[in-house]
Amino acid sequence: MTEAPRLSGPQLLAATLDADSFVSWDSPVPEPADPDYAASLAAARDRTGLDESVITGCGTLDGRRVAVMVCEFGFLGGSIGRAATRRLIDAVHRATAERLPLLAATASGGTRMQEGTPAFVGMIGIGAALAAHKRAGLPYLVYLRHPTTGGVLASWGALGHLTVAEPGALIGFLGPRVYEALYGASFPEGIQVAENLYAHGLIDAVVPPDQLAEIAARALRVLVGDRMAAPAEPPAEPIEPVPAWESITRSRRRDRPGVRRLLKYAATDVSMLNGTGQGERDPGLMLALARFGGVPCVLLGQDRRGQTAEQPLGPGALREARRGMRLATELGLPLLTVIDTPGAALSVAAEEGGLAGEIARCLTDLATLPTPTVSVIIGQGTGGGALALLPADRVICAQHGWLSPLPPEGASAIIHRDTDHAAELAEAQGVSSAELLAAGIVDKIVPERPDAAEEPAAFCRRMGQVLAHELAEQASIDSHERLARRAARARG
């Protein structure tokens, strides 16, 4: 089977933006003094029909106005010289001034060698313009195409809030041809490809060009969609007290719904993110953009399916969680944390990976996060791994959710040197949802009828209604007042 031809830059724009909506922002490019370089540029223009290696402008995507900047690899390998740099910087500044989300598609070998160091240092200005765009709370989405290497990847290609890549795309800091010339050996195969970057948590997804519009539109419905008023608060229901050990037993059922089914039944416009963006990916934590009842948020949740005895929640999961916290801050979105863990890893790798420090940093980041925060204990809440996601403006708990410094069996082993007293200690330590409510640790309990595992869809929708109300309610409170309340809560 022959591979489909790769789309050119103009073809990608046509396939992604609404029909006939693109408007160019490009200004004329000055001619270089070097006649050989001028001849190369003229040949590239004849070959591609473009005047430079980048196209900038605006258009609509699913009816929403967006700014775009797209590389054309056919134009001198998509290389970035001074004219292209100025074009990119101007486009970013204009997108910021007009408060437009920005979508970039790279395909480049990096800096244009014909222009040398002056072109090379221009990457600094592109990064600075993007930093200002993000400080303004505006989204930046990146599509890494084949190939993306060198200074383009190391500047504007690696700064997206959401970053996806073309299947099979070569993506790396040092191009394989340069590596072979410098070191006299071939770069190992399978490393600098999109799928491997995804496996290592460096990009969020691998998607073909014909799905880019859908992916970007869904993300933008969360990132810049209309902010809704708080949905009506679901009526309070009387909840019968349940022995702590019964809740613990129920929370450990393999068929109990967790964050995945919460997203499936209660959320819309879900865009999954992946990893820390810095080379780590822990299956025990799920990161997503989503809406609950129309209310947008960044969600970071402990995934019960991703935590096993062989691979418990590790420090990488908390670093991934902190990526979610940064996204919420940069984009001004509410943050929702979902707690569901039998406990963080107790291992050499966890110790050497700085687990305790990551717990501490999560606690301090959440305590000072400028955006509204809501936490939900949906199942097990064991130890520091659970506590790391707890600090919030409002804390919700499923009826059979619970929170404890150790699994009850561990507490029993410390005090009684056996595990036989686990149920007794769970009751004494006040770990159940009713005790957490009485102690002011949680603010609301969502009932289970009688067990979320027996009504997963209904339970998740019921929880989703509560979360939608709480997220919107916190977003309506003045930020100074909200932070003051949060600080008072932390003081107890």
Image: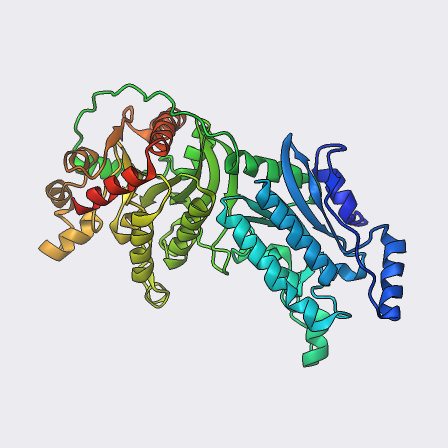
Q: Position of residue 227 (x, y in %)?
A: 46, 30
Give left or right: position of 364 versus 490.
right
Residue 287 appears in the rendering: yes
Residue 154 appears in the rendering: no
Task: Name the image quarter holding the C terminus.
Answer: top left
Q: What residue sits 55% from the left and 49% below the top?
A: 133
Of the pair 407 and 199, the residue shown nearer to us: 199
Look at the image and name its color scheme. rainbow
Q: Position of residue 68 (x, y in %)?
A: 67, 45
Q: Position of residue 57 (x, y in %)?
A: 70, 43
Q: Quadrant of residue 84?
A: bottom right
Q: Quadrant of residue 66?
A: top right
Give left or right: position of 234 versus 179.
left
Q: Is residue 360 above or below residue 301?
A: below
Give left or right: position of 284 versus 124.
left
Q: What residue sits 68% from the left and 72% below the top?
A: 117
Q: Position of residue 70 (x, y in %)?
A: 71, 49
